[in-house]
Amino acid sequence: MQDFCYKPGMTSLEEAIAAMKLTIEHNQKPLSAQTIPLFDAVDRVLAEDITSLVDVPPCDNSAMDGYALRASDLLDNDSLTLQGTVLAGQVFGSLLQQKYCIRIMTGAPIPDGADTVVMQEQVSVSDEIVSFVSDPVTGANIRRKGESIAKGSTVLSAGIRLQASDIALLASIGIAEVSVFRKLKIGLMATGDELIEPGKSLQPGQIYESNRVMVNALLTQFGVDCIDFGIIVDDYETTKTAFEEANKTCDVIITSGGVSVGEADFVKSVIDELGELNLWKIAIKPGKPFAFGKLSNAWVFGLPGNPVSSYVTCQQIALPLLMHMQHEQGTEPLVISAVADADIRKRPGRKDFQRGRYRIAEDGRYFAVSNGPQGSGIMTSFQNANCYILLDAQQGKVCEGDAINILPFSQFASK
Ligand code: AMP
Ligand code: MG
């Protein structure tokens, strides 16, 4: 493996991710694409540029329920005779006659001869005579052919992760199937003799295993297939067999546990035998240890075992690497400037992802406080939190009123 990673001591998060991405780029087999129906395409990464073969809308049509007319016919009088009706889905077969108008529904093609639509609320109708309150502006209430999308224009570029709005856009230009990068197969395993599956009864010395379900849940919206390899007990042969098995089918193996100092040698020695593994000390809190390596087929990302560290490193390190492997382009987290509502404890050294709560003041400014104890085993630090408070590595204690950055968890503001 061509490796751009090795660096002694602690590495900044940004530097570590950049180096790991570079290693992936130089060693990844090309990811194939597959053509799938639009219905299944949400959250997948587009593998081709999409050019529209049609104009949207395909012809001039009415933006309103109303009356289609020739504006000049109302210059010297204020009423016109009704010539007929055109509904959406129909085409009015004949030319609009002088001093006539045509009842038209939203989306119906503008009849030949008409140049303007007046909305129905601005007319009065008696028998076949339609009277207009004021002179219309020529061209009003017409959606022009190609005004949304011009035939021949590129509407979506390869590398975007398809959102619901993209799916609608593709359908609107008549596309039923798209080419997307195939799903990455992710093998999940948790290492540790103390771990037991939820649902079973807890014996002395045991704790419930919570990292595999967490990683699976974090990745579901990212177009991958997770394959569960279960809990791996701290035994050389069992670990080796599990890695060999996962290596056959998976693109990436995500493990948790066994990468902190003291335990590292165990997982590491198995992977060293089967491939290569680097243990990174990344200047991130919670987190720090992160293992990155490659077997003959699969990449290995080793998360720390503590649940909060595991969550944050999966989200902040493993996920960007997976997105990179999927050839996703142009993704940056949405960081918002805020003000500390209270002092925040912090020691210089590592970039901190504190679980916090923000509120939006009446003047629109964001204020945030830390959400209680921040220990790397305290998963409840996410409860009632609505953002990370991002504190730079070199930052020390934060005082009330200081400028900080936050990373909201959701697009919805919580109450
Ligand atoms: P390790 O990274 O293996 O040294 O584990 C650090 C701490 O996290 C220990 O207290 C472990 O018991 C705990 N831990 C490790 N793996 C898991 C897991 N999958 N689920 C819950 N806790 C874990
Ligand atoms: Mg362990």
Image (cartoon, rainbow, N blue to C red):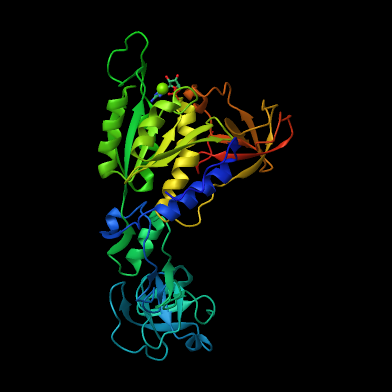
Tell me where residue 184 appears, x and y as whole percent. 33, 48
Q: Quadrant of residue 150?
A: bottom left
* Image quadrant in which you'd find residue 218: top left
**Number of numbered discs present?**
0
Closer to the camera in the image, 63 or 280: 280
91 or 236, nearer to the observer: 236
Q: Position of residue 323 (x, y in %)?
A: 43, 50
Q: Residue furthest top?
A: 204
| Left or right position of 177 against 413 | left
> In this rendering, is residue 273 above or below 326?
above
Q: Residue at x 38, y 74 (%)?
A: 57
In terms of image quarters, where does ligand 1 lie? Answer: top left
- Residue 396 in picture, x, y percent from top left: 71, 30
- Residue 296 visible within the image: yes
Residue reaching furthest front?
273
Image position of 205 (left or right of 35): right
Residue 371 found in image quarter: top right
> Which residue is depicted at the point 36% across and 71% down?
107
Q: Residue 305: in sight, yes or no? A: no
For the point 64% across and 33% down, the residue is 368
Q: In the rendering, at what x and y percent does residue 118 appear?
A: 46, 75
Viewer-side residue, 389 vs 395: 395
Q: In which quadrant will I find the C terminus?
A: top right
